[in-house]
Amino acid sequence: MSVTLHTSLGDIKVEIFCDTAPRTSFNFLALAASGNYDGTIFHRNMKGFMIQGGDPTGTGKGGESIWSGEFDDEFHPDNIHDRRGILSMANKGPNTQRCQFFITYERQPHLNNVYTVFGKVLDGWDVLDQMEKLPAVGGTKKSLVNKPIKPPIIEKILIHSNPLADDDLVYPTKNGAPERVQ
């Protein structure tokens, strides 16, 4: 299953791991389908590390999951930060996922079992290269140190196919079992 992030710098096509991170994938896909990410910026960019976005406030402090709060991490032995282009859900500690996500610029093994991996970049490597080269505001204020001077914008996310929706599966609660829609 894949999506395309249409950004102001170009397109990035990403595979979503619905089979090994189903709840996180469901949250991301539902937010994308509802337009939650449309018009948001990549507010944090750290060369050699990652670029982060998905916060509707653009500050790195906002946004909710589809369940109007936080939800638990999902770790799977196949989902690791082993290369450039890994898509993970941002958090502020264990089991605090909401809507923000990041894409790695290099392998980051210290993030394994700390941040939920739920996808990887398939195409758009040139766009990811451009993002990594963006200069940051800098300074001493924490919110500006890694904020791009001209942040890339997520214009829209196109969902190519959604096996969870195709199978009529929903996660009605943040911790409950999936259910089939009638």
Image (cartoon, helix red, strand yellow):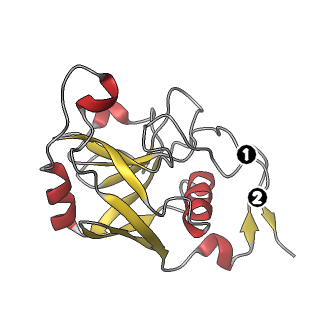
Q: Position of residue 6 (x, y in %)?
A: 36, 71
Q: Is residue 126 above or below residue 55?
A: below
User: What residue do we see at 48% from left, 80% from top?
Assistant: 160
Instruction: Determine whether, in the image, residue 179 is placed left or right of residue 64.
Output: right
Q: Which residue is mark 1?
A: 174
Q: Is residue 3 above or below residue 172?
A: below
CA separation in Å, label 2 and label 1:
10 Å
Amino acid beneath label 1: Lys
**SS class, disc 1:** loop
Q: In the displayed structure, does residue 72 sit left or right of residue 92? A: right
Q: Helix, strand, or loop for circle 2?
A: loop
Q: Residues within 10 Å of mark 2 (few under 14, many from 20)?
A: some
Residue placed at 23% from the left, 44% from the top? Answer: 148
Locate residue 168 relative to residue 136 in the image: left or right.
right
Quarter occupied by the C terminus = bottom right
Count of numbered circles on the image: 2
Which residue type does callout 2 highlight? Answer: Pro
Q: Does the CB distance between marks 2 and 1 fall below 8 Å?
A: no
**Residue 58 location (% of width, % of height):** 43, 44
Q: Where is residue 22 shown, x and y percent of the image? A: 60, 57
Q: Which mark is residue 90?
A: none
Q: Position of residue 15 (x, y in %)?
A: 41, 67
Residue 178 - label: 2
178 sits left or right of 76 in the view: right
Q: Residue at x 53, y 56 (%)?
A: 20
Q: Quadrant of residue 126?
A: bottom left
Closer to us: mark 2 or mark 1?
1
Q: Find residue 74 and report its image quarter.
A: top right
Image height of 165 relative to 23, above or below: below
- State the residue lying farthest toward the top: 140
Q: Is residue 94 above or below residue 14?
A: above
Q: Residue at x 18, y 30 (%)?
A: 138
